[in-house]
Image (cartoon, rainbow, N blue to C red):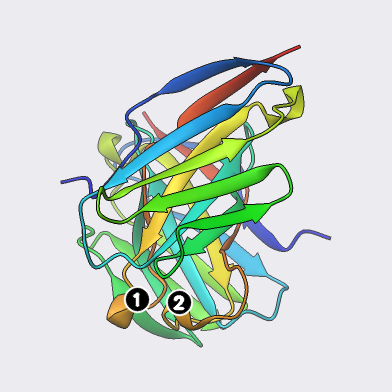
Amino acid sequence: DQQVKQNSPSLSVQEGRISILNCDYTNSMFDYFLWYKKYPAEGPTFLISISSIKDKNEDGRFTVFLNKSAKHLSLHIVPSQPGDSAVYFCAASAGGTSYGKLTFGQGTILTVHP
Amino acid sequence: DTAVSQTPKYLVTQMGNDKSIKCEQNLGHDTMYWYKQDSKKFLKIMFSYNNKELIINETVPNRFSPKSPDKAHLNLHINSLELGDSAVYFCASSQGPLPLRFRQGNYGYTFGSGTRLTVV
């Protein structure tokens, strides 16, 4: 019973173009969402987050969009750079008594070609 | 100066053995976690400690026992290892266990680089 799903295992994009990574969730109690980036043999690193009271959060080249009615969020990277090639994980938290517990998706491998 | 460090990075061991993975953070965080990345690549929480107190204990076999001697350390001991325990184990820390929406600004865990456990 995976409450957070990233249905695209991989994505290939040309340098300079937009990368769009998608994430769907089923638990309506989730109220905070995060994206993590992971390079091989390293731990995930925090990238950007969004609270459920917002529908967009932007940080430089990275923008996260949240559509609560569709239980869907996406990460946009513009412009994409070869250094962005990594695995991207979507994660969600339910607040309340979750004690900071994050539920992760299975990740999407992004490859940005020069 | 690594923020969250795990040792060992790789661990190969035989079925039935007992092994430990150590984790230390120097960020002054109050909360530490163990996550397991399974063969399907999902990261799933196992345990969380806040100031040495267990606050999250997911459905994990009791062969797995976390120990937190102080808030900067959270070790994971595994008894009677099985083939299915093979995975990458990640330690992480955060400023506290409060609901994330109450935090100012962006928030996220700091992860260690992982321990790849292979049981043969």
Q: Residues within 10 Å of mark 1 (few under 14, many from 20)?
A: many
Q: Which residue is mark 1?
A: A95
Q: For the residue labelled by badge 1, is the local secondary structure a helix, a strand or a loop?
A: loop
Q: Nearer the viewer, residue B58 or B73?
A: B58
Residue lying at 62% horizontally and 74% vertically, measured from the top left: B105
Distance between the Cα atoms at labels 2 and 1?
7 Å
Task: Tell me residue B97's x, y (percent).
Answer: 45, 81
Q: Amino acid at mark 1?
A: Gly
Q: Which quadrant would the C terminus of chain B be assigned to in this image?
A: top left
Task: Tell me residue B46's x, y (percent).
Answer: 34, 61
Q: Chain of mark 1?
A: A
Q: Is residue A46 left or right of residue A74?
A: right
Residue lying at 38% horizontally and 25% vertically, measured from the top left: A8
Q: Is residue B60 above or below residue A13?
A: below
Q: Amino acid at mark 2?
A: Arg
- Which numbered dot is residue A70? none
Q: Is residue B45 left or right of residue A54?
A: left
Residue lying at 34% horizontally and 31% vertically, measured from the top left: B39
Instruction: Give the image quarter of residue A99.
Output: bottom left
- Which numbered dot is residue B101? 2
Can the viewer see residue B10 in this picture?
A: no
